[in-house]
Every structure is written in structure tokens, then in C-alpha cells.
Amino acid sequence: MPLALITGASRGIGAAVARVLGGTHSLLLGGRDVAALRGLAGELPDARPWAVELTDQAALAAAVTGLSTVDVLVHSAGIGRVGRLADATAEVWRRTYEVNVIAAVELTRLLLPALRSARGQVVFVNSGAGRTANPGWGPYAASKFALRAYADVLRAEEPELRVTSVFPGRTDTDMQRGIRADEGGAYEPDRYLRAESVAAAVRTAVLAGDDAHFTEVVVRPR
């Protein structure tokens, strides 16, 4: 089976993507929570944990050694904090960019030979904040705009690859619970997308025929 590497696979959208691709792909489940990754791998027919700290460049380089062909790379790992620009320190900006942008950029760069070998696909789970920047979302939105720009350039520079940006609206995940706590608002999961719905959009893009290239997919709660 073709190989898919999914970051952020221990929970949320990443875990949901792993479940919908588990029947069609061998999986490498990226994340830091080894116990959660092992539990998820046990549910799937051909999956194994790929535990690595994405912001550790040396560890990342070592972890990709031996991956000569990768058919699908899904970037789902990310962090999100909200707050006014006046309160966003340099450390907040650095950490947001390290996780949301630089980690994805570096992993993609390291895997380009393996992706080219497969004429593969890179999927960036972006955010509605990567299309519209609202007050309180400065560092996060900026990181997602940067990730969108990177995907656009990658698509142009690597025409043999399919490059897809998925822009989900608010989704019922642990990260969303943290965001709502920061905002001081009630958590109302029925108002949000389910992670499985976002994963279904990713699956559609990945399983599209060779003649089709989903460059951008926007998913909103009804």
C-alpha cells in the first residue's frame, strides 16, 4: 500500500485523518504522545508510531532517514493561542512559527526526494485564520497565512507533486477547548465541525484521480 505520514496524529484532526486513510495507506503516525500513537496504531491495519519532536531539527533529520518513498504527507500538527497583539511577546510569535510553519517547512524539505519519487501529495491542514485575520488571532493567523504562502510556492516549484491546503473552520478538538478558554467563552461543540468531517475532506483530496488536483479545500460548520 502507499505510505502516508501524518503529523499531529495523536489526537484531533490528525487522528481522524489517520483513521480515514487507514484502509488505503500504510501509516506513519507522527506526534509526541507515544502511548496515544500506539493506541491508534493498534486500531489500524498497517500503522506504526513515528514519535519525534518536530521542532528539533536534528531529531527530525534522523527520523526521516530511510524513508525513500512517501506518497502522502499530511501536516496536522499545530498550536493556537489567542490574545491581543499588545500582549503577544516575541516568545509567543517564535513558538507559534516554530510549530505551525518552520516544522512543516523543514519536514517537507527533508522529504522532498521521497515525495518526488512517489509523485506524491502534501496536505497542509491550515485554518480559516489562514484566509481571514481577525482581532485576537495575530500570531496564529500570521503563521497560517505564511503556511498558505509556502504551500502556494511549493505547488508552483514542484509541479509533479499535488499540494493541498485545507481550511477548516472551528473544529471540536482539544486545541479548540484551549482557544475558547483563552477567549473566556463557553465551549459549544455542536457549533463546531467534527474532526471526522475535516478528515473526510482530506481523504477526498488524497484519493482524487490522477487527473484531479485539489489545491484548496474550505470546510465550514453549517
Image (spheres, rainbow, N blue to C red):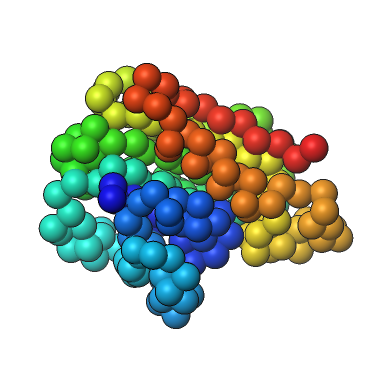
- Front-most of residues 44 and 67: 44
- Front-most of residues 119 and 45: 45
Residue 39 in the image: state x and y as whole percent: 47, 76
Residue 154 in the image: state x and y as whole percent: 32, 29
Farthest residue, direction bottom? 35
Residue at horizontal 27 percent and vertical 21 percent from the top: 159
- Front-most of residues 153 and 19: 19
- Looking at the rendered structure, the number of numbered marks drawn on it comes to 0
Residue at horizontal 28 percent and vertical 36 percent from the top: 120
Residue 216, compared with residue 137, is above or below; it is above
Residue 30 in the image: state x and y as whole percent: 38, 62
Tell whether 112 sits left or right of 146: left
Residue at horizontal 49 percent and vertical 42 percent from the top: 203
Residue 151, compared with residue 200, is above or below; it is above
Residue at horizontal 47 percent and vertical 26 percent from the top: 214
Quadrant housing the C terminus: top right
Q: Is residue 72 visible?
A: yes
Residue 83 in the image: state x and y as whole percent: 70, 52
Q: Can you tell which quarter of the image residue 22 is in?
A: bottom left
Tell whether 69 sits left or right of 148: left
Q: Is residue 144 visible?
A: no
Q: Can you tell which quarter of the image residue 213 is in?
A: top left
